[in-house]
Image: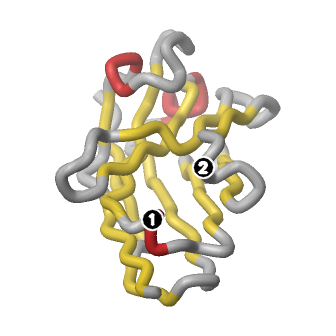
Amino acid sequence: QVQLVESGGGLVQAGDSLRLSCAASERTFSRYLMGWFRQAPEKEREFVAAISWSGGITYYADSVKGRFTISRDNAKNMVYLQMNSLKPDDTAVYSCAANLEGHAIRIGSGYTYWGQGTQVTVSS
């Protein structure tokens, strides 16, 4: 079982940047497609970004495209989400997740392992 631990959240102002990190417990992590999802209060969880096992292919939600960048370092068992030009609408709990099959990339049910999440709050 892969354990995932997020870090890097916080309170920032609109226009600021944050980098979220996700640490995986096992080296098998490098075989998995990894994703970031977010959930705001009273809203459904939504897909943010994903990255293939090699890092060669990335996927983004339209709402973050051009502002967020997902990356990974398989040697360190880490996945990152660089978030620039943050907006109040980006306020949410951000969670990383592991997708074992590489299917249903934009859907939460496609992911097997989840972290606990890290809070990102963007003030206007």
Name which quarter of the figure residue 91 lies in.
Answer: bottom left
Near mark 2 (Cα within 10 A), the count class, few <14, some 14-19 or many ≥20, is: few
Location of the N terminus by quadrant is top left
Near mark 1 (Cα within 10 A), the count class, few <14, some 14-19 or many ≥20, is: few
**Disc 2 element:** loop
User: Total marks drawn?
Assistant: 2
**Disc 1 element:** helix
Image disc number at residue 89: 1
Name which quarter of the figure residue 32 lies in.
Answer: top right
> Residue 54, relative to residue 43: is it above or below?
above
> Residue 119, relative to residue 94: is it above or below?
below
The residue drawn where x is 59% and y is 58% is 81
Left or right: residue 42 compared with residue 65? left
Residue 12 location (% of width, % of height): 47, 87
Residue 64 location (% of width, % of height): 63, 53
How far is mark 1 from mark 2, CA to CA?
10 Å
Q: Amino acid at mark 2?
A: Ser
Mark 1 vs 2, N-terminal side:
2
The residue drawn where x is 61% and y is 84% is 16
Left or right: residue 88 compared with residue 66? left
Name which quarter of the figure residue 111 lies in.
Answer: top left
Q: From the image, tell me which residue sits under label 2.
A: 63
Q: Amino acid at mark 1?
A: Asp
Most distant residue in the left direction: 42
Q: Nearer the viewer, residue 123 or 117?
A: 123
